[in-house]
Amino acid sequence: MRGPGFASAARPAFPMRVTGPILFLILVVAAGRVPAAQTSTATLNASVNSVARLSLSSAALTFPDADPDTVPSVQASQGPITVTAKARTSPNGAITLTVRATDDLRSGVNTIPASNITWVASGAGFGNGTLSATTAQAVATWTGSGVRTGTQNFFFRNVWSYATGTYTLTITYTLSAA
Amino acid sequence: MKKAVWSGAIAAAVVLLGSSSAFAQQTAGASIAVTAHVDAKAKLTLSLSSINWLDADPDTTPTFSSGAITVDVKARTSAGGAVTVTVLADQDLTSGSDTIPINTLTWTATGTGFTGTGANNMTTAQTLGSWTNSGNHSGTQTLSLPNSWSYRTGTYTATLNYTLTAP
């Protein structure tokens, strides 16, 4: 089982003849100050690390077709998305939730700028915003650890000039706890 | 005693490792797939639905004019798709058995994409405007009819049917 460098397979890793004299000296010194009552101290170390967890109530948003004259702003058929952010951070540490589109809305070669999707938010720390395919947009910011919940109600700007098609994109959320 | 010494060393190492990661930035992600449906549709609006020309002296009023009729065109079509507005009369201007040829009812139009001048026809739809791609278009059309001494008396009527096509 041992490699060739070991002299004996039964040899202990830390021989008693090395550590024994050291322990003896410690005990002699301690014996001169034996207390009437002995006190022991146990130290408990609990590690609380930074952690972040994000959950959304829906993984899809659908904007149905509508007449631009009567529905100039189309609400997503799923209704408001509930966002739950859980984060542990340092005292007064910043927690940010951002969102960014992977691309403009695209249907084949036709595109509609992602900025035509906006949201109205509710919940402490949450704010309204406009989607972007180039820059992550702030959805919410908080300070300190905790669990926060809010909603985002998404709308699609509906105008006559769009070419017909089924347009798609993906929006990605990032929760950061410093 | 030896075990206690090594346990302490291990515990210290764990605490140190925990301390170094406690301040590292943590991130979590999620995503949503977004779909927007944009279907074809067309909407045509005229600022009036009837024209009524009262009798007039041909010498003082040689031409009846409707005044400018606003034509609003809204269409969603495929990229590069053709959008057209055509006009087709249902008949000549007719009063009983008397008629005035519908092609004497002419128009002038203004606005980008609108056909500047034209004459109505009851067999072939006449193009009032044409465009490419989705969008809004607005223009005017003014209808004119000569007021001739040769007309027989009567109340003449015809209907002009406007059709907006956006494939």
Image (spheres, rainbow, N blue to C red):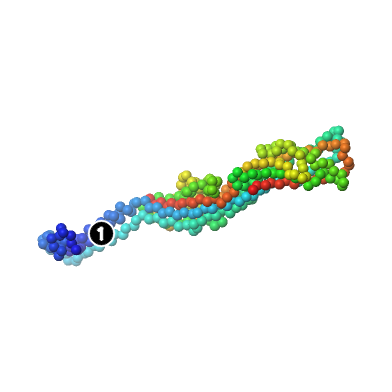
Q: How many dots with numbers? A: 1
For the view shown, which residue lies furthest in the top direction?
A: B59
Which residue position is annotated with label 1? B11
Residue at coordinates 32% horizontally, 53% vertically from top-left?
B21
Give residue A158's position: percent from left, percent from top.
59, 48
- Residue B70 is at least partly visible in this image: no
In which image quadrant can residue B111 be found? Answer: top right
**Which quadrant of the figure has residue B133?**
top right
Name the amino acid, label 1: Ala
At x 40%, y 50%, the residue is: A94
Residue under the image location 62 percent in, 45 percent down: B81
Q: Quadrant of the N terminus of chain B?
A: bottom left
In the image shown, does A148 or B52 lie closer to the viewer? B52
Which element carries disc 1, helix, strand or loop? helix
Marked residue chain, label 1? B
What is the residue that sits farthest to the right in this orientation? B153
Residue A54 point in image, percent of width and height: 43, 56
Percent of width and height locating residue A90: 36, 52
Image position, residue A152 (x, y; %): 51, 53
Can residue B40 be seen at all in this image of the molecule?
A: yes
* Residue lying furthest bottom: A37
Instruction: Name the one closer to the observer, A51 or A141.
Output: A51
Q: Nearer the viewer, residue A17 or A161?
A: A161
- Badge 1 crowding class, 10 Å Cα cut-off, few under 14, some 14 to 19, many 20 or more, is few
Residue positioned 25% across, 56% down in the render: B13
